[in-house]
Image (cartoon, helix red, strand yellow):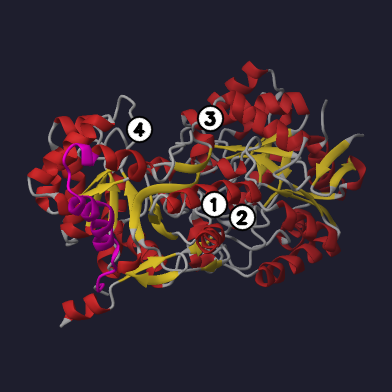
Amino acid sequence: MADAHAHLSAAVNTVLGTVPADSLGVVAIHEALLSVLPGAQYAYDITLDQAKIFDTLASKLRAFKAAGGGTVVDNTGMFHGRDLPLLESLARATGVNIIASTGMGPEENLGGYFLTPQTNPPTPWPADKFADLLAQEITDGMVIPRLERRAPAGLVITEADAHGITPTEVSLFQGSARAALRTGVALSVRWGTDAHAELAHVLGEGLESNRVIVANLDRADAVAEGVPATVAAKGAYVALDHVGQNDGSYIDDAARVTLVTELIAAGHADRILLSSNAIGVAAGLTPVTLPYEFVLTEFVPALRAAGVSDADVQQILVDNPRDVLTVRGGKA
Amino acid sequence: MGKVNTVLGPVATETLGLIAFHEHIGYGMPGSELDSKWWKTPEQKYEETVPKLRAFHEYGGGTFVDATGICNGRDLDYYKSLSAKTGVHIVASTGFVGGDTALAHFAHASVEYLADQFIHEITVGIGNSGAKAGIIKVGVSRGGRMTDLDKRIYRAAARAAKLTGVAVMTHLAIDAEPAIEIFGEEGLPLDRVVFGHVDDGVNHDKSKDTWIASLGGRIGFDTFGYETELPDPPFWARPRKDRLDHFLRFIGEQGYLGQVLASADANCSPLGWPGVKGHTVNYIFEDLIPDLRAAGIDEATITTIFVDNPADFLTLHN
């Protein structure tokens, strides 16, 4: 009964409201539209030219659509430049579905409000407070700081420190998992040094593995240890989300093609997600200027050349993101 | 005598009048803006703030120095409107309350970059408001010891102060040795720095106020009114008489009247915390000055504390 209801109302939260899950089309699931390092908005040497930002992003989104793309997920979270009126206007102007995310991380990107609160001693936030803050971004809508709430978030994101998850990030991971569990929205985690141990922090909260995306699994150290396959075997989604980025810390696209074919051969086609982590407009950080359609225009032909079937391509680019982004019945 | 940057432009030092040198229009930790439990409408913020500034003006207050640094909810266009509509001079600060209130972009930054940020805000303006900062805020992070980031901010502040002539105010005077060393290395005279919060309930016994003063530093007794006698005192509260006696000792037998500044560190309309009910900048007029008079302090001394000392301190020295 509950399952039938979930299927009938299968819907995804976009910045313009809920849409039927079947209407997403090809999804670029780990991308950034406007990405602002916390604090860069106050920097004397950075100007956020709203008109120029809109034009840049609109033309990138139109190119994505022209190449067959349907939906872009902005995975910058709630404190890294998320500009909801901008995203809403872009979605309306381009016809591309835009899904915005809630969440924060790593710890070094959090505000002092969460790390050194005005209490004695200044104990960092516990998991339940993060859970409440993040769940509210879904139940009541995403915040425009100190102004108003808009549409519900479509994804919870979080990230561990690259040198190893910190105690506060453990709280943040647990709180993010609780928010996902409570609201039925999926959770995407960027791992620091140990993908399985960090995944365990969120699964330990009772979140089902098929509601979790492990991001950055095309990192060379993860691939060397076979982590993508073992994460998929656990039932979580495996995001190979630096397609087109071929620097030293990630595997290159040729190795990505091999990895995808291996995961498919191992029966994990329904766990694979592909994206590029492009940054449309960056402030305070280095932009990643790949087009949002890079997976479609460059990587899919390479997959096909390696013998990946159309059905598998459809599964990876359309069905898997649809399934993970579909809001499930939350447990209030 | 000179000039001071206010949010509505530079003014002559002689026009400052009585100065509340360490106050907040509204302070919130970075990230608190994401938590809707604290949100207030603009109507509510003005309603909470304007009567306090108007009363300050009517009591004879001239200048309100806002000690809210970058990333803590500083809002220059709002300050400009408040100043214009109440007749109170408002001086805004650049800098940071402490390293733990500097967001990632600044936490990763070099001393040179931080100095450039401060210099820009003092000489060109803050954001696109056109308003120039009149003072630099620095401070010690929670935990009681200066962090590496705190030290970079102090060093950048020293360079910006030296170049622009504005003064530096600190949040906390604990662990002052590295601060004094940095100011010395950068060639900033200590009379261009006020070491603040020497009087609060948590840190007064760890703050070497007379030692800092003996080296030439200015000393801020600037948490007046945060008293344990309040119905719901904050953790940094202190018994009223203890603080007053500490202050009287410092300006009396210890002889540092010429280096003292006093303020209430109140929020007109707090942004990311509940604030302390009933505590306003007007504690200066309603409680502190009457207490000083009752203790036998004469009018000339009161003028020294609230007019002459802060005016000399705030005046651009370059």
Would you name the residue on which mark 1 appears? Answer: A58
Amino acid at the residue labelled 1: Ala
Residue at the outermost left position: A266
- Crowding at mark 2 (Cα within 10 Å: few <14, some 14-19, many 20+): few
The chain letter under disc 3 is: B
| Segment colored magenta | A303-330
B12 sits left or right of A87 in the view: right
Disc 1 is placed on an element classified as: helix
Tag shown at residue B109:
3
Query: Which residue is depicted at the point 37% across and 50% down?
Result: A124
B128 sits left or right of A169 in the view: right
Q: Is residue A317 part of the magenta span, yes or no? A: yes
Q: Along the polypeptide, which appears first: circle 4 or circle 1?
A: 1
Both labels 3 and 4 in a single chain: no
Q: Is residue B158 part of the magenta span, yes or no? A: no
Would you name the residue on which mark 2 appears? Answer: B241
- The mark lying in front, picked from 2 and 4, is 4
Closest to the observer: A39 or A242?
A: A242
- The mark lying in front, picked from 1 and 3, is 1
Residue A160, given in percent of the width and then of the height, sits at: 30, 42
Q: Gap in Å between the C-alphas at discs 2 and 4?
A: 65 Å
Amino acid at the residue labelled 2: Lys
The chain letter under disc 2 is: B
Would you name the residue on which mark 4 appears? Answer: A245
The chain letter under disc 1 is: A
Q: Are marks 1 and 3 in contact (CB under 8 Å)?
A: no
> Would you place residue B214 above or below residue B2 in this image?
above
